[in-house]
Protein backbone atom coordinates (compact mmCIF):
# COMPACT_ATOMS: atom_id res chain seq x y z
CA UNK A 1 0.00 0.00 0.00
CA UNK A 2 1.53 3.32 -1.00
CA UNK A 3 1.38 6.19 1.40
CA UNK A 4 -0.82 8.76 -0.22
CA UNK A 5 0.46 12.33 0.10
CA UNK A 6 0.25 14.37 2.25
CA UNK A 7 1.06 11.83 5.05
CA UNK A 8 4.58 10.70 5.98
CA UNK A 9 3.18 7.35 7.19
CA UNK A 10 0.06 5.25 6.83
CA UNK A 11 0.32 4.29 10.49
CA UNK A 12 2.34 5.77 13.32
CA UNK A 13 2.59 3.92 16.63
CA UNK A 14 3.52 5.55 19.94
CA UNK A 15 5.08 2.95 22.25
CA UNK A 16 7.06 -0.17 21.32
CA UNK A 17 5.55 -2.44 23.98
CA UNK A 18 3.41 -5.54 23.56
CA UNK A 19 0.51 -3.90 21.73
CA UNK A 20 2.47 -1.31 19.76
CA UNK A 21 5.10 -3.66 18.33
CA UNK A 22 2.52 -6.23 17.32
CA UNK A 23 0.32 -3.65 15.61
CA UNK A 24 3.29 -2.04 13.82
CA UNK A 25 4.68 -5.35 12.56
CA UNK A 26 1.33 -6.61 11.33
CA UNK A 27 0.48 -3.33 9.63
CA UNK A 28 3.87 -3.34 7.90
CA UNK A 29 3.23 -6.96 6.90
CA UNK A 30 0.04 -5.82 5.17
CA UNK A 31 2.10 -3.31 3.19
CA UNK A 32 1.47 -0.16 5.25
CA UNK A 33 4.22 2.41 5.70
CA UNK A 34 4.69 2.35 9.46
CA UNK A 35 6.69 4.45 11.92
CA UNK A 36 7.09 3.79 15.64
CA UNK A 37 8.40 5.85 18.56
CA UNK A 38 9.75 4.41 21.81
CA UNK A 39 11.07 6.57 24.62
CA UNK A 40 12.48 3.99 27.03
CA UNK A 41 12.87 0.33 26.13
CA UNK A 42 11.92 -2.11 23.37
CA UNK A 43 9.31 -4.65 24.37
CA UNK A 44 7.67 -2.34 26.92
CA UNK A 45 6.59 -3.31 30.41
CA UNK A 46 6.24 -7.04 29.78
CA UNK A 47 9.80 -7.54 28.57
CA UNK A 48 11.59 -5.03 30.79
CA UNK A 49 9.77 -4.70 34.11
CA UNK A 50 6.84 -7.09 33.89
CA UNK A 51 6.00 -10.65 32.88
CA UNK A 52 9.44 -11.82 31.75
CA UNK A 53 11.78 -10.62 34.55
CA UNK A 54 9.02 -11.46 37.03
CA UNK A 55 8.83 -15.06 35.83
CA UNK A 56 12.63 -15.36 35.89
CA UNK A 57 12.53 -14.17 39.51
CA UNK A 58 9.82 -16.74 40.26
CA UNK A 59 12.01 -19.51 38.82
CA UNK A 60 14.97 -18.24 40.85
CA UNK A 61 12.95 -18.08 44.04
CA UNK A 62 11.79 -21.70 43.69
CA UNK A 63 15.35 -23.09 43.92
CA UNK A 64 15.50 -23.30 47.76
CA UNK A 65 12.06 -24.95 47.74
CA UNK A 66 13.18 -27.46 45.09
CA UNK A 67 16.31 -28.16 47.10
CA UNK A 68 14.23 -29.00 50.17
CA UNK A 69 12.04 -31.26 48.03
CA UNK A 70 15.17 -32.92 46.65
CA UNK A 71 16.20 -34.00 50.15
CA UNK A 72 13.11 -36.21 50.27
CA UNK A 73 14.40 -37.92 47.15
CA UNK A 74 17.70 -38.70 48.83
CA UNK A 75 19.76 -35.80 47.51
CA UNK A 76 22.15 -34.55 50.13
CA UNK A 77 24.45 -31.60 50.48
CA UNK A 78 24.36 -28.06 51.75
CA UNK A 79 21.56 -25.77 50.71
CA UNK A 80 22.67 -23.50 47.83
CA UNK A 81 23.18 -19.85 48.70
CA UNK A 82 22.06 -16.96 46.53
CA UNK A 83 24.46 -14.63 44.77
CA UNK A 84 22.04 -11.75 44.13
CA UNK A 85 24.29 -9.88 41.63
CA UNK A 86 24.42 -13.02 39.45
CA UNK A 87 20.63 -13.28 39.41
CA UNK A 88 20.27 -9.61 38.44
CA UNK A 89 23.08 -9.74 35.85
CA UNK A 90 21.72 -12.88 34.17
CA UNK A 91 18.21 -11.46 34.16
CA UNK A 92 19.53 -8.23 32.62
CA UNK A 93 21.42 -10.15 29.94
CA UNK A 94 18.27 -11.98 28.92
CA UNK A 95 16.26 -8.75 28.88
CA UNK A 96 18.91 -7.08 26.67
CA UNK A 97 18.72 -10.04 24.31
CA UNK A 98 14.95 -9.64 24.10
CA UNK A 99 15.29 -5.86 23.55
CA UNK A 100 17.47 -6.72 20.55
CA UNK A 101 14.93 -9.25 19.29
CA UNK A 102 12.15 -6.63 19.41
CA UNK A 103 14.32 -4.03 17.70
CA UNK A 104 15.23 -6.47 14.93
CA UNK A 105 11.58 -7.49 14.48
CA UNK A 106 10.67 -3.87 13.84
CA UNK A 107 13.67 -3.23 11.61
CA UNK A 108 12.99 -6.45 9.73
CA UNK A 109 9.41 -5.31 9.14
CA UNK A 110 10.78 -2.09 7.66
CA UNK A 111 9.44 0.23 10.41
CA UNK A 112 11.61 3.28 11.04
CA UNK A 113 12.18 3.50 14.82
CA UNK A 114 12.33 6.88 16.50
CA UNK A 115 13.97 6.41 19.88
CA UNK A 116 12.42 9.29 21.75
CA UNK A 117 9.23 10.45 23.39
CA UNK A 118 6.35 11.14 21.01
CA UNK A 119 3.46 13.46 21.69
CA UNK A 120 0.31 14.07 19.70
CA UNK A 121 0.08 17.41 17.96
CA UNK A 122 -3.19 17.01 16.08
CA UNK A 123 -5.39 14.26 14.67
CA UNK A 124 -2.72 13.25 12.12
CA UNK A 125 0.53 14.58 13.55
CA UNK A 126 3.02 13.53 16.22
CA UNK A 127 6.08 15.36 17.45
CA UNK A 128 9.23 13.36 18.18
CA UNK A 129 12.49 15.02 19.22
CA UNK A 130 11.39 18.36 17.85
CA UNK A 131 10.26 17.03 14.45
CA UNK A 132 6.73 16.59 13.22
CA UNK A 133 5.56 13.44 11.44
CA UNK A 134 2.15 12.95 9.86
CA UNK A 135 0.19 9.73 9.53
CA UNK A 136 -3.20 8.69 8.21
CA UNK A 137 -3.79 6.67 11.40
CA UNK A 138 -2.15 7.03 14.82
CA UNK A 139 -2.02 4.34 17.49
CA UNK A 140 -1.39 5.18 21.15
CA UNK A 141 0.07 2.13 22.91
CA UNK A 142 1.90 3.82 25.76
CA UNK A 143 0.99 1.34 28.51
CA UNK A 144 0.83 2.16 32.23
CA UNK A 145 3.05 3.16 35.12
CA UNK A 146 2.95 2.22 38.83
CA UNK A 147 2.17 4.82 41.45
CA UNK A 148 2.61 5.10 45.20
CA UNK A 149 -0.26 6.70 47.11
CA UNK A 150 0.35 10.01 48.81
CA UNK A 151 1.46 9.12 52.32
CA UNK A 152 4.19 10.69 54.45
CA UNK A 153 7.49 9.03 53.53
CA UNK A 154 6.31 7.73 50.14
CA UNK A 155 9.72 8.66 48.70
CA UNK A 156 11.20 5.71 50.64
CA UNK A 157 8.91 3.21 48.91
CA UNK A 158 9.73 1.40 45.68
CA UNK A 159 7.47 -0.06 42.99
CA UNK A 160 7.82 -3.18 40.86
CA UNK A 161 9.95 -1.10 38.45
CA UNK A 162 12.73 -0.71 41.02
CA UNK A 163 12.25 -4.16 42.53
CA UNK A 164 13.84 -5.65 39.42
CA UNK A 165 17.07 -3.72 40.03
CA UNK A 166 17.58 -3.80 43.81
CA UNK A 167 21.28 -3.69 44.73
CA UNK A 168 20.78 -6.53 47.21
CA UNK A 169 18.11 -8.90 48.45
CA UNK A 170 16.41 -7.20 51.41
CA UNK A 171 16.49 -9.14 54.66
CA UNK A 172 13.01 -7.84 55.58
CA UNK A 173 10.52 -6.74 52.92
CA UNK A 174 7.01 -5.36 53.11
CA UNK A 175 4.81 -5.64 50.03
CA UNK A 176 1.75 -3.42 49.92
CA UNK A 177 -1.25 -4.25 47.76
CA UNK A 178 -3.71 -7.03 47.03
CA UNK A 179 -3.39 -7.46 43.28
CA UNK A 180 -1.52 -10.18 41.46
CA UNK A 181 1.74 -8.21 41.24
CA UNK A 182 1.83 -7.77 45.04
CA UNK A 183 1.08 -11.46 45.61
CA UNK A 184 3.76 -12.50 43.13
CA UNK A 185 6.44 -10.29 44.67
CA UNK A 186 5.57 -11.50 48.18
CA UNK A 187 6.20 -15.05 46.94
CA UNK A 188 9.39 -14.14 45.08
CA UNK A 189 10.99 -12.30 48.00
CA UNK A 190 9.95 -14.96 50.50
CA UNK A 191 11.23 -17.73 48.25
CA UNK A 192 14.56 -15.98 47.79
CA UNK A 193 14.99 -15.81 51.54
CA UNK A 194 13.60 -12.48 52.77
CA UNK A 195 11.21 -12.15 55.70
CA UNK A 196 8.05 -10.90 54.00
CA UNK A 197 4.91 -9.15 55.22
CA UNK A 198 2.15 -8.36 52.76
CA UNK A 199 -0.21 -5.59 53.74
CA UNK A 200 -3.55 -5.13 52.05
CA UNK A 201 -6.36 -2.85 53.15
CA UNK A 202 -9.15 -5.18 51.94
CA UNK A 203 -10.25 -8.29 53.78
CA UNK A 204 -8.62 -10.74 51.32
CA UNK A 205 -6.26 -10.23 48.41
CA UNK A 206 -7.00 -10.89 44.69
CA UNK A 207 -10.42 -9.27 44.64
CA UNK A 208 -12.46 -10.47 41.67
CA UNK A 209 -10.92 -13.95 41.64
CA UNK A 210 -12.75 -16.99 43.05
CA UNK A 211 -13.12 -16.55 46.82
CA UNK A 212 -12.31 -20.13 47.79
CA UNK A 213 -9.21 -20.10 45.57
CA UNK A 214 -8.07 -16.83 47.15
CA UNK A 215 -8.55 -18.30 50.62
CA UNK A 216 -6.65 -21.43 49.66
CA UNK A 217 -3.70 -19.40 48.34
CA UNK A 218 -3.66 -17.25 51.48
CA UNK A 219 -3.43 -20.44 53.56
CA UNK A 220 -0.55 -21.80 51.47
CA UNK A 221 1.35 -18.52 51.62
CA UNK A 222 0.93 -18.29 55.40
CA UNK A 223 2.13 -21.88 55.67
CA UNK A 224 5.31 -20.87 53.82
CA UNK A 225 5.86 -18.06 56.29
CA UNK A 226 4.53 -14.97 54.50
CA UNK A 227 3.03 -12.66 57.11
CA UNK A 228 -0.27 -11.69 55.47
CA UNK A 229 -1.96 -8.70 57.06
CA UNK A 230 -5.38 -7.94 55.64
CA UNK A 231 -7.55 -5.00 56.66
CA UNK A 232 -4.35 -2.99 57.20
CA UNK A 233 -2.60 -0.10 55.54
CA UNK A 234 0.49 2.00 56.02
CA UNK A 235 0.00 5.49 57.45
CA UNK A 236 3.63 6.65 57.46
CA UNK A 237 7.10 5.54 56.39
CA UNK A 238 10.21 6.83 58.18
CA UNK A 239 13.80 6.17 57.29
CA UNK A 240 16.05 5.52 60.25
CA UNK A 241 19.63 4.33 60.58
CA UNK A 242 18.54 0.69 60.98
CA UNK A 243 16.04 0.64 58.11
CA UNK A 244 12.51 1.73 57.32
CA UNK A 245 9.94 2.11 60.08
CA UNK A 246 6.34 1.75 59.06
CA UNK A 247 3.45 3.00 61.15
CA UNK A 248 0.26 1.18 60.24
CA UNK A 249 -3.25 2.63 60.37
CA UNK A 250 -4.01 0.82 63.64
CA UNK A 251 -0.93 2.44 65.25
CA UNK A 252 1.22 -0.72 65.19
CA UNK A 253 4.71 -0.53 63.71
CA UNK A 254 6.78 -2.69 61.44
CA UNK A 255 10.47 -2.43 60.52
CA UNK A 256 11.85 -3.47 57.15
CA UNK A 257 14.59 -2.81 54.61
CA UNK A 258 12.37 -2.41 51.56
CA UNK A 259 8.73 -1.42 51.17
CA UNK A 260 7.34 -2.30 47.76
CA UNK A 261 4.07 -0.68 46.71
CA UNK A 262 2.07 -2.65 44.19
CA UNK A 263 -1.19 -0.83 44.78
CA UNK A 264 -1.99 0.13 41.23
CA UNK A 265 -0.90 1.37 37.84
CA UNK A 266 -2.06 4.40 35.90
CA UNK A 267 -2.42 4.69 32.13
CA UNK A 268 0.48 6.61 30.55
CA UNK A 269 -1.56 9.50 29.19
CA UNK A 270 -0.15 12.55 30.99
CA UNK A 271 1.35 15.25 28.75
CA UNK A 272 0.76 13.16 25.65
CA UNK A 273 -1.13 15.88 23.78
CA UNK A 274 -4.44 14.04 24.12
CA UNK A 275 -6.34 17.04 25.44
CA UNK A 276 -5.00 19.23 22.67
CA UNK A 277 -6.30 16.73 20.11
CA UNK A 278 -9.62 16.36 21.93
CA UNK A 279 -9.11 12.66 22.70
CA UNK A 280 -11.46 11.59 25.46
CA UNK A 281 -10.06 9.93 28.62
CA UNK A 282 -11.99 8.53 31.57
CA UNK A 283 -11.50 9.64 35.16
CA UNK A 284 -8.58 7.23 35.67
CA UNK A 285 -6.80 8.85 32.72
CA UNK A 286 -7.44 5.84 30.44
CA UNK A 287 -8.16 6.52 26.78
CA UNK A 288 -11.75 5.72 25.90
CA UNK A 289 -12.11 3.56 22.78
CA UNK A 290 -14.96 1.83 20.96
CA UNK A 291 -14.91 -1.87 20.09
CA UNK A 292 -12.59 -1.20 17.14
CA UNK A 293 -10.12 0.62 19.48
CA UNK A 294 -10.94 3.93 17.84
CA UNK A 295 -11.02 6.98 20.08
CA UNK A 296 -13.53 9.78 19.63
CA UNK A 297 -11.00 11.29 17.16
CA UNK A 298 -11.49 8.96 14.16
CA UNK A 299 -7.82 8.82 13.07
CA UNK A 300 -6.50 8.01 16.57
CA UNK A 301 -6.61 4.50 18.03
CA UNK A 302 -5.46 3.10 21.38
CA UNK A 303 -4.74 -0.43 22.62
CA UNK A 304 -3.37 -2.17 25.69
CA UNK A 305 -2.88 -0.87 29.22
CA UNK A 306 -3.36 2.75 28.18
CA UNK A 307 -7.06 1.89 27.79
CA UNK A 308 -7.04 0.20 31.25
CA UNK A 309 -9.45 -2.58 30.40
CA UNK A 310 -7.82 -6.01 30.56
CA UNK A 311 -4.21 -5.24 31.39
CA UNK A 312 -2.46 -8.36 30.15
CA UNK A 313 0.16 -8.85 27.45
CA UNK A 314 -1.79 -11.34 25.31
CA UNK A 315 -4.75 -8.97 25.35
CA UNK A 316 -2.60 -6.01 24.21
CA UNK A 317 -1.22 -8.25 21.43
CA UNK A 318 -4.69 -9.31 20.32
CA UNK A 319 -5.92 -5.71 20.33
CA UNK A 320 -2.88 -4.51 18.35
CA UNK A 321 -3.47 -7.25 15.76
CA UNK A 322 -7.16 -6.39 15.51
CA UNK A 323 -6.35 -2.75 14.71
CA UNK A 324 -3.74 -3.65 12.08
CA UNK A 325 -6.00 -6.25 10.43
CA UNK A 326 -8.93 -3.91 10.30
CA UNK A 327 -7.05 -0.88 8.99
CA UNK A 328 -4.69 -2.57 6.55
CA UNK A 329 -5.66 -6.23 6.19
CA UNK A 330 -9.24 -5.65 5.19
CA UNK A 331 -10.54 -7.89 8.00
CA UNK A 332 -12.92 -6.97 10.78
CA UNK A 333 -11.49 -8.74 13.81
CA UNK A 334 -13.16 -8.63 17.19
CA UNK A 335 -11.18 -9.56 20.27
CA UNK A 336 -13.28 -11.92 22.34
CA UNK A 337 -12.93 -10.98 26.00
CA UNK A 338 -14.92 -13.97 27.27
CA UNK A 339 -13.07 -16.74 29.07
CA UNK A 340 -9.64 -15.09 29.08
CA UNK A 341 -7.39 -17.46 31.03
CA UNK A 342 -4.96 -15.89 33.48
CA UNK A 343 -2.29 -17.05 35.87
CA UNK A 344 -0.96 -15.57 39.04
CA UNK A 345 2.63 -16.68 39.48
CA UNK A 346 2.24 -16.88 43.22
CA UNK A 347 3.69 -19.74 45.24
CA UNK A 348 1.87 -21.99 44.60
CA UNK A 349 0.58 -20.46 41.36
CA UNK A 350 -3.04 -19.87 40.46
CA UNK A 351 -4.54 -20.56 37.04
CA UNK A 352 -8.05 -19.50 36.28
CA UNK A 353 -10.52 -19.25 33.43
CA UNK A 354 -14.17 -18.30 33.39
CA UNK A 355 -16.47 -17.34 36.22
CA UNK A 356 -15.76 -17.44 39.92
CA UNK A 357 -18.35 -19.31 41.99
CA UNK A 358 -19.76 -15.98 43.20
CA UNK A 359 -20.12 -14.58 39.66
CA UNK A 360 -21.45 -17.86 38.27
CA UNK A 361 -24.18 -17.98 40.89
CA UNK A 362 -25.32 -14.51 39.89
CA UNK A 363 -25.10 -15.16 36.18
CA UNK A 364 -26.37 -18.75 35.83
CA UNK A 365 -28.47 -19.24 38.96
CA UNK A 366 -28.25 -22.99 39.48
CA UNK A 367 -24.66 -24.24 39.40
CA UNK A 368 -22.76 -27.35 40.42
CA UNK A 369 -19.42 -26.89 42.12
CA UNK A 370 -16.77 -29.62 42.08
CA UNK A 371 -13.67 -29.25 44.23
CA UNK A 372 -10.61 -31.25 45.10
CA UNK A 373 -7.78 -30.56 47.54
CA UNK A 374 -4.77 -32.85 47.58
CA UNK A 375 -1.04 -33.22 48.07
CA UNK A 376 0.61 -33.62 44.64
CA UNK A 377 2.57 -36.83 44.16
CA UNK A 378 5.86 -34.89 44.05
CA UNK A 379 5.45 -33.90 47.70
CA UNK A 380 4.46 -37.30 49.06
CA UNK A 381 8.05 -38.33 49.75
CA UNK A 382 9.22 -34.88 50.77
CA UNK A 383 9.09 -33.00 54.05
CA UNK A 384 8.41 -29.87 52.01
CA UNK A 385 4.66 -29.73 51.39
CA UNK A 386 2.61 -27.68 49.00
CA UNK A 387 -1.06 -28.54 48.58
CA UNK A 388 -3.14 -28.12 45.45
CA UNK A 389 -6.73 -27.00 45.06
CA UNK A 390 -8.91 -27.46 41.98
CA UNK A 391 -12.39 -26.25 41.32
CA UNK A 392 -14.82 -26.58 38.47
CA UNK A 393 -18.09 -24.70 38.14
CA UNK A 394 -20.84 -26.09 35.94
CA UNK A 395 -24.01 -24.37 34.81
CA UNK A 396 -26.75 -26.80 35.95
CA UNK A 397 -29.17 -25.89 33.16
CA UNK A 398 -26.96 -26.94 30.22
CA UNK A 399 -24.06 -28.83 31.87
CA UNK A 400 -21.57 -26.32 30.45
CA UNK A 401 -18.32 -25.79 32.35
CA UNK A 402 -18.25 -22.06 33.08
CA UNK A 403 -15.40 -21.71 35.56
CA UNK A 404 -12.15 -23.53 36.33
CA UNK A 405 -9.74 -22.50 39.04
CA UNK A 406 -6.60 -24.07 40.31
CA UNK A 407 -4.05 -23.17 42.94
CA UNK A 408 -1.13 -25.55 42.73
CA UNK A 409 2.01 -26.44 40.85
CA UNK A 410 1.88 -25.72 37.08
CA UNK A 411 -1.59 -24.16 37.36
CA UNK A 412 -0.82 -21.70 34.56
CA UNK A 413 0.39 -24.42 32.21
CA UNK A 414 -2.57 -26.67 33.00
CA UNK A 415 -5.23 -24.02 32.58
CA UNK A 416 -4.19 -22.86 29.10
CA UNK A 417 -5.41 -26.08 27.46
CA UNK A 418 -8.61 -26.25 29.47
CA UNK A 419 -9.36 -22.66 28.42
CA UNK A 420 -9.66 -23.87 24.82
CA UNK A 421 -12.16 -26.53 25.86
CA UNK A 422 -14.18 -24.01 27.85
CA UNK A 423 -14.25 -21.50 25.02
CA UNK A 424 -15.45 -24.29 22.73
CA UNK A 425 -18.39 -24.75 25.12
CA UNK A 426 -17.32 -28.08 26.65
CA UNK A 427 -19.82 -29.71 28.99
CA UNK A 428 -19.09 -31.51 32.21
CA UNK A 429 -20.06 -34.75 30.52
CA UNK A 430 -17.37 -34.14 27.86
CA UNK A 431 -14.83 -33.58 30.62
CA UNK A 432 -16.00 -36.82 32.28
CA UNK A 433 -15.61 -38.86 29.11
CA UNK A 434 -12.11 -37.51 28.47
CA UNK A 435 -9.45 -39.98 29.55
CA UNK A 436 -7.00 -38.56 32.08
CA UNK A 437 -3.22 -38.41 31.78
CA UNK A 438 -1.92 -40.47 34.65
CA UNK A 439 -0.30 -39.72 36.99
CA UNK A 440 -0.78 -35.98 36.73
CA UNK A 441 -2.49 -33.24 38.68
CA UNK A 442 -4.43 -32.14 35.58
CA UNK A 443 -6.28 -35.48 35.40
CA UNK A 444 -8.16 -34.40 38.51
CA UNK A 445 -10.18 -32.05 36.28
CA UNK A 446 -11.55 -35.00 34.28
CA UNK A 447 -12.26 -37.22 37.27
CA UNK A 448 -14.41 -34.94 39.46
CA UNK A 449 -17.48 -37.15 39.82
CA UNK A 450 -19.61 -35.85 42.71
CA UNK A 451 -20.33 -32.17 43.20
CA UNK A 452 -19.13 -30.63 46.46
CA UNK A 453 -22.24 -28.46 46.46
CA UNK A 454 -25.10 -27.54 44.15
C1 LIG B 1 5.31 -6.51 37.44
C2 LIG B 1 4.38 -6.84 36.30
C3 LIG B 1 4.14 -8.16 35.97
C4 LIG B 1 3.29 -8.47 34.93
N1 LIG B 1 3.06 -9.78 34.66
C5 LIG B 1 2.24 -10.12 33.64
C6 LIG B 1 2.03 -11.48 33.32
O1 LIG B 1 2.56 -12.39 33.97
N2 LIG B 1 1.22 -11.78 32.28
C7 LIG B 1 0.61 -10.78 31.53
O2 LIG B 1 -0.11 -11.11 30.58
N3 LIG B 1 0.79 -9.48 31.83
C8 LIG B 1 1.60 -9.13 32.85
N4 LIG B 1 1.80 -7.81 33.14
C9 LIG B 1 1.07 -6.78 32.34
C10 LIG B 1 1.74 -6.52 31.01
O3 LIG B 1 3.08 -6.22 31.19
C11 LIG B 1 1.01 -5.40 30.30
O4 LIG B 1 -0.36 -5.69 30.23
C12 LIG B 1 1.54 -5.18 28.88
O5 LIG B 1 2.92 -4.91 28.89
C13 LIG B 1 0.78 -4.03 28.23
O6 LIG B 1 1.29 -3.76 26.94
P1 LIG B 1 1.11 -2.34 26.28
O7 LIG B 1 1.56 -2.48 24.88
O8 LIG B 1 -0.23 -1.81 26.54
O9 LIG B 1 2.11 -1.38 27.09
P2 LIG B 1 3.63 -1.51 27.48
O10 LIG B 1 4.13 -2.88 27.30
O11 LIG B 1 3.74 -0.91 28.83
O12 LIG B 1 4.38 -0.61 26.41
C14 LIG B 1 4.24 0.78 26.38
C15 LIG B 1 5.50 1.36 25.77
O13 LIG B 1 5.27 2.71 25.42
C16 LIG B 1 6.41 3.47 25.71
N5 LIG B 1 5.97 4.88 25.82
C17 LIG B 1 5.14 5.40 26.76
N6 LIG B 1 4.91 6.69 26.48
C18 LIG B 1 5.59 6.98 25.34
C19 LIG B 1 5.73 8.15 24.56
N7 LIG B 1 5.08 9.28 24.85
N8 LIG B 1 6.54 8.11 23.48
C20 LIG B 1 7.21 6.97 23.13
N9 LIG B 1 7.09 5.83 23.85
C21 LIG B 1 6.29 5.83 24.94
C22 LIG B 1 6.91 2.86 27.00
O14 LIG B 1 8.27 3.17 27.24
C23 LIG B 1 6.68 1.38 26.74
O15 LIG B 1 7.80 0.77 26.14
C24 LIG B 1 2.66 -7.44 34.17
C25 LIG B 1 2.92 -6.11 34.48
C26 LIG B 1 3.76 -5.80 35.53
C27 LIG B 1 4.02 -4.36 35.86
Image: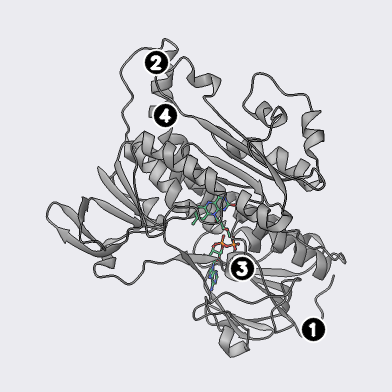
Q: Which residue is mark 3?
A: 141
Give me the residue at 68% from left, 35% from top. Answer: 451
Image position of 290 (left or right of 167): right
> Disc count in the image?
4
Q: Which circle's residue, 3 or 1, is located before the other in the chain?
A: 1
**Are discs 2 and 1 less than 8 Å apart at CB?**
no
Estimate the x, y position of residue 219 in percent, counting from the top left: 42, 39
For the residue labelled by badge 2, is the local secondary structure a helix, a strand or a loop? helix
Q: Which circle's residue, 4 or 2, is located before the other in the chain?
A: 4
Q: Which residue is mark 4?
A: 63
Mark pair 4, 3: CA separation:
36 Å
For the residue labelled by badge 4, is the local secondary structure a helix, a strand or a loop? helix
Mark pair 3, 1: CA separation:
25 Å
> Closer to the observer: label 4 or label 1?
4
In this view, the residue in front, 3 or 46, is 46
Asked whether residue 86 is in view, the answer is: no
Q: Which circle's residue, 4 or 3, is located before the other in the chain?
A: 4
Q: Which residue is mark 1?
A: 5
Query: CB at mark 1 closer than 8 A to ligand 1?
Result: no
Asked whether residue 324 is in view, the answer is: yes
**If the picture is divided into quarters, which one holds ligand 1?**
bottom right
Give me the residue at 76% from left, 58% from top. Answer: 336
Q: Which residue is mark 2?
A: 71
Report crowding for label 2: few under 14, some 14 to 19, many 20 or more residues within 10 A (C-alpha).
some
> Closer to the observer: label 4 or label 2?
2
Estimate the x, y position of residue 72 in percent, counting from the top left: 42, 14
Report crowding for label 3: few under 14, some 14 to 19, many 20 or more residues within 10 A (C-alpha).
many
Amino acid sequence: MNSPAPFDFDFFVIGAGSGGVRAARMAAGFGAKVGIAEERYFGGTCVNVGCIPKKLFVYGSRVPHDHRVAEGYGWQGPAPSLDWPTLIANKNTEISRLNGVYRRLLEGAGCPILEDRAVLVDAHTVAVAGRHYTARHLLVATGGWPFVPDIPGKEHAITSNEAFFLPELPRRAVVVGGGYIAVEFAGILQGLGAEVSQIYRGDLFLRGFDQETREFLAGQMRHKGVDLRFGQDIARIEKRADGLHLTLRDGSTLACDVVLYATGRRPNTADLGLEQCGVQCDKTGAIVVDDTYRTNVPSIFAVGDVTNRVNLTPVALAEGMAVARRLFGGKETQVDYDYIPTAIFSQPPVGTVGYSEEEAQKRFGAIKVFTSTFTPLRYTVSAEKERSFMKMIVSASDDRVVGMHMCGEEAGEIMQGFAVAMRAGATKQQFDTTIGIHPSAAEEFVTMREPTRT
